[in-house]
Image (cartoon, helix red, strand yellow):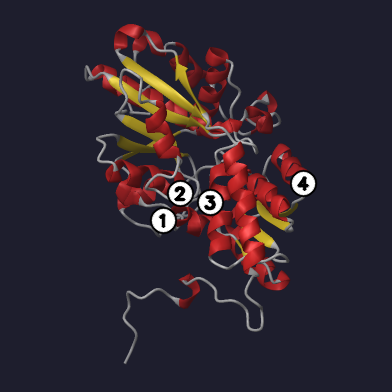
Amino acid sequence: MSAPSDLPAPSDLPALPAPGRPMPDRDWVAEAVRRVEADANRSADTHLHVFPLPAEWGIDLYLKDESVHPTGSLKHRLARSLFLYALTSGWLGPDTPVIEASSGSTAVSEAYFARLLGLSFVAVMPACTSPEKIALIEFYGGRCHLVDDPRGIYAESHRLAEETGGHFMDQFTYAERATDWRGNNNIAESIFEQLRLERHPVPRWVVVGAGTGGTSATIGRYLRYRRHGTRLCVVDPDGSAFFEGWSRGDAGVTAVGSRIEGIGRPRVEPSFVPSVVDTMLRVPDAASVAAMRHLLGVTGQRAGGSTGTNLWGALTLVGRMRAAGERGSVVTLICDGGDRYAHTYYDDAWVAAQGLDLVPYARRLAAFTSTGTLESDDGR
C-alpha cells in the first residue's frame, strides 16, 4: 500500500541525531539557554521613531528601529530565537559546529550567539554579500564560505553540516516556528505596547519585507491572535519570488534573487506564510535605494536597502489612506544600519554600475508632502 501523497517527504523532516552521537548534556544546555536569555534581558527594547508627515493629514508613520540591537539588525531577534529553538530541541551540544545559509545579517547575529556559547560558526553566503557584513561575521569569530550562485547556499550548508558533524540552523525553514507569535515580547507585541499612548494606538497597517518570512508570519499571527483590525503589507523587491508566489498562490515560483540584501529570495521560503498577508507591494530596487537615502536626508537615520523598501511601501500606503480620506497610523521597520552598505547602496559608482536610476524616485519622495502620493500611473 503506497503512502498518502500529502505526507512530507523524508527530506522535509527534522534530522534525527546521527547514530552514536550522544544527546547534548542537559547541564550544558541549561547554561547555554541562560546565556542567551541573559542577552535578551540586557537589551532594552528597540525605539519607535516618528517619521515627519504634515499634521493636517491625520496620519502618523512610525519606524521601529531594529538597528539598535547588539548586532545591529532585526536579525538579532531571529538568531536568538533560532538558537533557543535548536538548544531546546536537543540539536546543539558543546562541540557542535553551527552552519547557516544567509545573505548577511542573520549570519552576523548567529556568529555573535555562537561565540557567546563557545561554538564554531560557518556562514554560507552569496559571493556578492557586502564586505562590511563579511567583516562583522569574522569579527564575531565566524567563518564565511562564499558561493557564486545564491541558489546553492542551501545544498552547500547541508553538505558542510554533514561533513563537519554540525547543525544547519536553516533560518528559512525554522524562522516562522522558532519565534513565539503569541507574545513574549516579540516584535509585534513590542510595537503595540509602544503605540499604547499614541493618538492612533492600533495601526491600520504594518509594513515589513520578507527574507525568511519569519517576521511577517509572527506579526500576521499576532494580529489575528490579539483580534486587531491592523492589516499586514509585505513589500518585495525586484528579483524576488515572494510577490509572484503570493499573487499566484504558487509556492513553487522561482526568480533570480534580489539585490536588496536581507529581503527577497530566489524561491518562496518554507517560513513564508502567505495566508497571514493582507496585501503585497512590489518595490523597484531604485525606489528602495532612493527611499533609504531619503530617510537619511529627512531624519538623519542611516539605514540599509531593505529599510528603503519598507519606507517606500509605507509611504505608498500613507498616500492611499490620504486619497481615501482615512486617518490612522502606519508602522514599518528600520532593519539595520547603513554602515554595512558604504560600498554598495551609498556608493554612487556601485549604483550606476547596477544600472539603477534613482532620480525619478528621489523626485517623487521629495514632492511627497505636496503631492500626497508616490505612485505613478502604473501604480509603482
User: Which residue position is annotated with label 4?
Assistant: 138
Quadrant of the image for the C terminus? top left
Label number found at residue 214: 2
Q: How many marks?
A: 4
Q: Earlier in the sequence, mark 1 or mark 4?
A: 4
User: Which residue position is annotated with label 1?
Assistant: 253
* Any part of residue 254 in sight: yes
- Which tag is nearer the camera, tag 3 or tag 2? 3
Q: Residue furthest front?
A: 27
Element assignment for label 2:
helix
Q: Residue at x 34, y 44 (%)?
A: 222
Distance CA(mark 3)–CA(mark 4)? 22 Å
Residue 289's quadrant in the figure?
Answer: top right
Label number found at residue 81: 3
Q: Amino acid at mark 3?
A: Ser
Q: Earlier in the sequence, mark 3 or mark 4?
A: 3
**Category of crowding for the residue at label 1, using alpha-carbon neighbours closer than 10 angstroms: few (below 14), some (14–19), many (at least 20):** some
Residue 243 at what x, y percent from top left? 39, 45
- Which tag is nearer the camera, tag 2 or tag 1? 2
Q: Earlier in the sequence, mark 3 or mark 1?
A: 3
Distance CA(mark 1)–CA(mark 4)? 34 Å
Q: Are discs 3 and 2 less than 8 Å apart at CB? A: no
Element assignment for label 4:
helix
Q: Are discs 3 and 4 less than 8 Å apart at CB? A: no
Q: Earlier in the sequence, mark 2 or mark 1?
A: 2
Q: Are discs 3 and 1 less than 8 Å apart at CB? A: no
* Side of 140 where 101 appears, left or right: left
Q: Residue at x 75, y 45 (%)?
A: 140
Q: Residue at x 62, y 34 (%)?
A: 354
Q: Amino acid at mark 2?
A: Gly
Distance CA(mark 3)–CA(mark 1)? 28 Å
Q: Earlier in the sequence, mark 2 or mark 4?
A: 4
